[in-house]
Amino acid sequence: MIEPIRVLVAKPGVDGHDVGAKLVCRALMDAGISVVYTGLRQSPDAIAAAARDHRADVVGLSIMSGAHLTLCEKVAASLKQAGMGNAKLIVGGVIPARDHEALAKLGARAVFGVSATLDEVVRWVEENGRRAS
């Protein structure tokens, strides 16, 4: 039997809006994907530790605060330091199109703005979520 894809969803920084993150978690779970939600106001190191502990294939950051570039950079560095550099980092939230390229350079494999559908997120995870061993 194939193990389900493992996704860790996190809210880095001081952003307190997590309804969208919870909806993404539910959609992923409904699709048979294993999901862990870390809750609000997580540090990059705490996110990386949780990703390591849960052996996450995908780490999804939900950012509504506008600090997506700084937070993504810090989380990507923490993931590498924790030995989780091969987990696929995705970012969602209030993300201007002009920042997508910068996020990709920081290690984000996919960026989902507020207009992205839950089906788009689920499909991306199903098609791209397995991490190389």
Image (tube, helix red, strand yellow):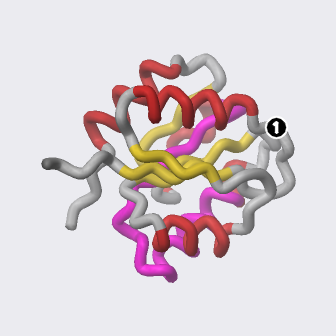
Placement of the C terminus among the 4 image quadrants: bottom left
Quadrant in the rendering for residue 78: bottom right
Residue 129 placement (x, y as % from top left): 32, 45
Q: In the displayed structure, would residue 88 be above or below residue 65?
A: below
Residue at 22 percent of width and 61 percent of height? 132
Would you say residue 115 sits in the magenta stretch?
Answer: no
Span highlighted in magenta in the image? 71-96
Q: Which residue is label 1 attached to?
A: 17
The secondary element bearing badge 1 is classed as loop
Q: Identify the residue at horizontal 71%, vertical 32% (top origin).
A: 94
Q: Amino acid at mark 1?
A: His
Q: Residue at x 50, y 65 (%)?
A: 51
Where in the figure is residue 20, as x and y percent of width and height? 68, 30
Asked whether, in this view, residue 96 is left or right of residue 27, the answer is right
Q: Indicate the quadrant where residue 13 lies.
A: bottom right
Q: Is residue 50 left or right of residue 66?
A: left
